[in-house]
Image (spheres, rainbow, N blue to C red):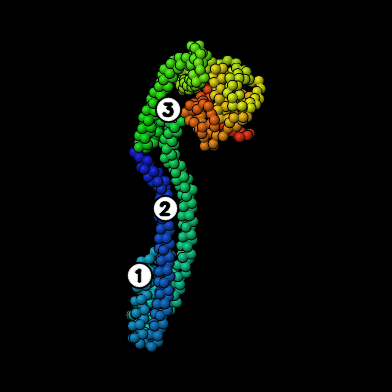
Amino acid sequence: MKFSFRPKSILRLILAGFLFVALPLIAALVIATISVDRLVTHSQHTLLQSVLVTQGSQVLMEAITAMERNARQYQVLGDKLLFDVYEENHAKFADTARTLESLELTGWQEGLLGDLQLHENEIYTALSTYSHDAKETLAALAGFPGLASTAQQILVQNQDLISSGIEQIQAMAEKVQRTLVMQAVALVPAALLLTGLFAVLITRPINQIDDAIRRLGDGKFSKPAVVTGPRDLEQLGERLNWLRQRLLELEQEKKKFLQHISHELKTPLTAIREGAELMGEQVVGELNSQQREIAEILQDNSIRLQKLIEDLLSFSMVKSRSSTLFHEQVDMQVLVEDVLSRHKVAMLSRRLDLRPSLRPVTVYGDREKLHTLVDNLVSNAVKYSPDGAILRVRLSRRNGHCVIEVADSGPGIPANERERVFDAFFQGAPADKSHVRGTGLGLSIAREYAQAHGGDVAVVKSDTVGACLQVSLPLEQDG
């Protein structure tokens, strides 16, 4: 049976976490309090009993001394007042003996106390029965030293018990200390383990939500959001899934729109471009200077519009999973040279100083898409390079990869835009004196094609001013 702990809310989960983490610590505190309380109670009881027995023994010895003194004075003088004082000390002795009997005495102490009471009572009986000068009275007086000796033994025995009680208290204290240390060794790791467990239970659904939001932000709508945890966070995960479905539907609608509008525009644009070319070539008749200028404007803008439509079509094809790579051996040196030759007119018109450094490299990939990839990078560099600037294009083999670098002399790419420039429809600052305003799709298409070949495109640090875009393509691919 699978255990599932799912409170209704994140607040309840946090409160449960605090409770479970605090329980071992509270248990340790309660056990420690009980143990210390028992130790203190036992110590107080032991010390109190020892003090009472010691005080009682001392009172007995004082009473025996006083009784002996009074009895001997009575035996010599025969004064009834002296006997009355003796009786008062006798009563004090009896009360103290009864108090000692109520205390927790050892068997030996109880025996000594019983003998003491018995002998003292025999002396009292003799003094009460016979006259002060009778031989029985004189014989009774000889028993007082024995009483004092017995009382002294009780006191000495109690001192030994005090020492023994202190040792017992020390042993109990050491036992309590060991118990508390063992509890700390056992409970502190348990508390830490529970803390880690609830930290995972609390942070896991939050991380899952964070991952789901990041995927939505990156445009990855295929994987559903899975949130396991408190029910309120699971409901939030369900809402994210609803949002993912809506975004996926909007993305599909956008692709359909791009496909349809691009195809719908391409057919009339072809007619407009061909008509402008016929007019420019004066096939329909000779044109004056103003008419030729208008025909050139129509022709240039039709070419520009066709480029925009082709970018939209390429972007739509890249985003659709039906796009397939047709792999073959591609000589990248020939391909890059062909791309550069197609931009030769634009570079001449801008007086750009092209400095290529091309080494022979062969890649197994789709020739048409690789051509588009390189063409987009070169077109971007030409567009952002000022008139008379230097344009560097390098082709090399590095660590099992084909590396293409295109560096312009333009304003460069700010650090906060080096990833955004690959987003669809993103456009940075406008190029100075640029004759073409792009769609913001060229670099996005370039990256998609590079990643489709198992590589990537990135903005790297340039040796000079401007931006440097680097393509890295694996030389071999499982195809």
Badges 2 and 1: C-beta atoms under 8 Å apart?
A: no
Q: Residue at x 44, y 75 (%)?
A: 148
Task: Give coordinates of residue 105: x percent, y percent.
Answer: 40, 64
Which labelled disc corresponds to residue 162?
A: none
- Between marks 1 and 3 in the image, the one whose residue lies nearer the viewer: 3
Residue 197 versus residue 357: which sits nearer the camera?
Answer: 357
Q: Nearer the viewer, residue 150 or 424?
A: 424
Disc 1 vs disc 3: Cβ atoms closer than 8 Å? no
Residue position for label 1: 98
Q: Earlier in the sequence, mark 1 or mark 3?
A: 1
The amino acid type, in three-letter code, at marker 2 is: Leu
Q: Residue at x 41, y 63 (%)?
A: 44
Residue for badge 3: 221
Give the percent coordinates (x, y) of residue 380: 55, 27
Mark 2 = which residue? 29
- Classify the position of the C terminus by image quarter: top right
Q: Quadrant of residue 351?
A: top right
| Amino acid on which the number 3 mark rests in the picture | Phe
